[in-house]
Image (spheres, grey):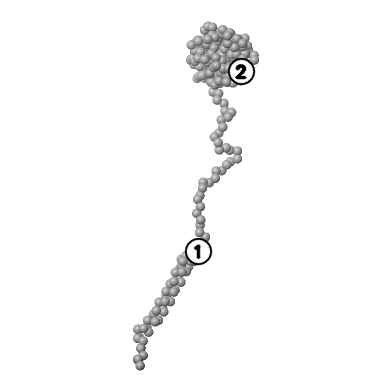
Amino acid sequence: MNPKRLRSQDSDSTGPTRTRLLLTGVLVCLVLLAGCGGNTDDGGTTVANTEAPVEETATSAPPTMETAGTSSTSPSTAGTSTVPANVSTNASGLEVTVDPTTENTTDVNLIAHATMTDATASEGIETITIETGGGLDLTNVSVANVDTAGIDENGSLVRDRTDESLASSVERDVQVADDGRRLRIALDGNTSVEPGDEIVAVLEGGVETGSAGSYTFGLAVDNATAQTDDYTITSS
């Protein structure tokens, strides 16, 4: 008969130790599992995270605010006049430019645009007469100062352009009278103007301004009533 094996004392002491280690491991696992489901607050307790994840979206520029009555386009220039400040326009169809307008100035430039009407049109121009009204002295004006003298048919051209020149129709040098207030140009009568045509005359230099004040400029074709326009000579 075999003798009964006795358990050593060491084996009896390790049993409770293994049990304690096993329980400690279980508790650690539980703590770790609880920590995965929440955040730990300052008090050391586990707090469940109830905030929903924030979804990031691309931000765009704020929409442009439109104000009633405003336009996003560039300001329109429609209706804005391009006529220089020293040009006057009236119902008679005559526009006169004096440059410069300072009193007692020599070598002044003079531009006149006269739109023909039924009363001023001519089938054969023989004379063009200019009356300055006293604000301009034309005594020293000669043919050499005439830069442009012509006809803009239907008044369709810009600036001082003409369709037909009057230079070849001038019979002799210009005639100045009335202390330089009147200038008369004699033509051969071979050039006609119709209603809507524009006579363009440009004098470069030779003109002198008088005293400061307001004056009336006149231009007449043949014996028709003169077309008039007002101009101003300014103080120096």
Quadrant assignment for the N terminus? bottom left
Q: Earlier in the sequence, mark 1 or mark 2?
A: 1
Number of marks drawn = 2
Location of residue 57 with respect to 100 vertically, above or below: below
- Residue 195: x and y in percent read 62, 16
Q: In what element is the residue under mark 1? A: loop
Front residue of 157 and 172: 157
Disc number at residue 172? none
Circle 2 residue: 196
Outermost residue, top side: 172
Q: What residue type is labelled 2?
A: Gly
Residue 233 visible in the shown view = no
Q: Which amino acid does label 1 sit on?
A: Asn
- Residue 32: x and y in percent read 44, 69
Residue 80 picture quarter: top right
Residue ID at (36%, 90%)? 4
Residue 21 visible in the shown view = yes
Q: Do the residues labelled 1 and 2 touch (CB within 8 Å)?
A: no
Measured in 3D between alpha carbons, the distance from the residue under mark 1 to the one under mark 2, in whole angstroms, is 90 Å
